[in-house]
């Protein structure tokens, strides 16, 4: 599900990173809908859910927090961008002004969510080393398995470029 959300976000990102277009095309609306749907479908792995994550200690705790931040922030931000788009096109004049005045906050939140996601791989590698690496984990978690896990969460794959350039009131 994460890969689908990342792909949908990367498709929509160039269309909204500077703010909502004055006259959004059907393509913009479709891209925002797709990203919203994919972000809403994100599910936390059981170990990262609130009641389970509380048992994580040491380096595992921040990794769980990064993933929770990503999933919740991405889902809410895309939902709010979709609502802002709807209000800017079909709402009252006041609702449209409010939507445009605040959409930059939601766009920045999508960026922040993906920044969090991109940090997981680095934090996973650092945590593995901090906990003793191969000497501590032996065959239960090998360096190649950790590297493969970390590769699923990388700056190259998950971080959005360019940084959001939307401004309040855009």
Image: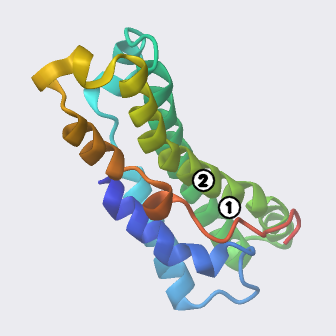
Left or right of residue 104: residue 40: left
Q: Nearer the viewer, residue 37 or 60?
A: 60
Left or right of residue 103: residue 82: left
Q: State the residue position of label 2.
A: 77
For the C terminus, the image quarter is: bottom right
Compared to residue 123, the image places residue 156 above or below, namely: below
Q: State the residue position of label 1.
A: 107
Seen at 68% across and 61% down, the residue is: 107
User: In the image, residue 53 lies at what x, y percent?
Assistant: 39, 17
Seen at 77% across and 62% down, the residue is: 104
Task: Answer with mark 2 or mark 1, whichever residue precedes in sequence.
Answer: 2
Q: Which mark is residue 63?
A: none
User: In the image, residue 56 lies at what x, y percent?
Assistant: 39, 13
Circle 2 sits in a helix, a strand or a loop, which is it? helix
User: Which residue lies most toward the front here?
Assistant: 135
Give the class, few, some or many, for how many residues have Cα within 10 Å of label 2's Cα (few <14, many ≥20): many
Circle 1 sits in a helix, a strand or a loop, which is it? helix
Seen at 45% across and 37% down, the residue is: 67
Compared to residue 135, the image places residue 35 above or below, namely: below
Q: Nearer the viewer, residue 62 or 76?
A: 62
Seen at 37% across and 16% down, the residue is: 131
Q: Nearer the viewer, residue 136 or 35?
A: 136
């Amino acid at each position: 599900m994460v890969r689908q959300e990342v792909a949908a976000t990367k498709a929509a990102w160039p269309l909204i990173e500077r703010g909502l277009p004055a006259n959004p095309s059907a393509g913009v609306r479709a891209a925002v809908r797709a990203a919203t749907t994919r972000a809403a479908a994100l599910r936390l792995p059981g170990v990262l859910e609130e009641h389970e994550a509380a048992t994580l200690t040491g380096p595992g705790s921040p990794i769980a927090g990064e993933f929770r931040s990503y999933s919740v922030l991405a889902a809410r931000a895309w939902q709010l961008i979709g609502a802002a788009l709807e209000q800017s096109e079909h709402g009252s004049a006041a609702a449209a002004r409010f939507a445009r005045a605040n959409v930059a906050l939601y766009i920045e939140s999508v960026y922040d969510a993906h920044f969090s996601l991109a940090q997981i791989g680095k934090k996973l590698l650092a945590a593995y080393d901090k906990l003793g690496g191969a000497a501590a984990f032996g065959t239960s978690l090998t360096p190649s398995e950790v590297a493969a896990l970390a590769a699923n969460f990388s700056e190259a794959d998950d971080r959005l470029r360019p940084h959001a350039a939307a401004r309040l009131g855009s």
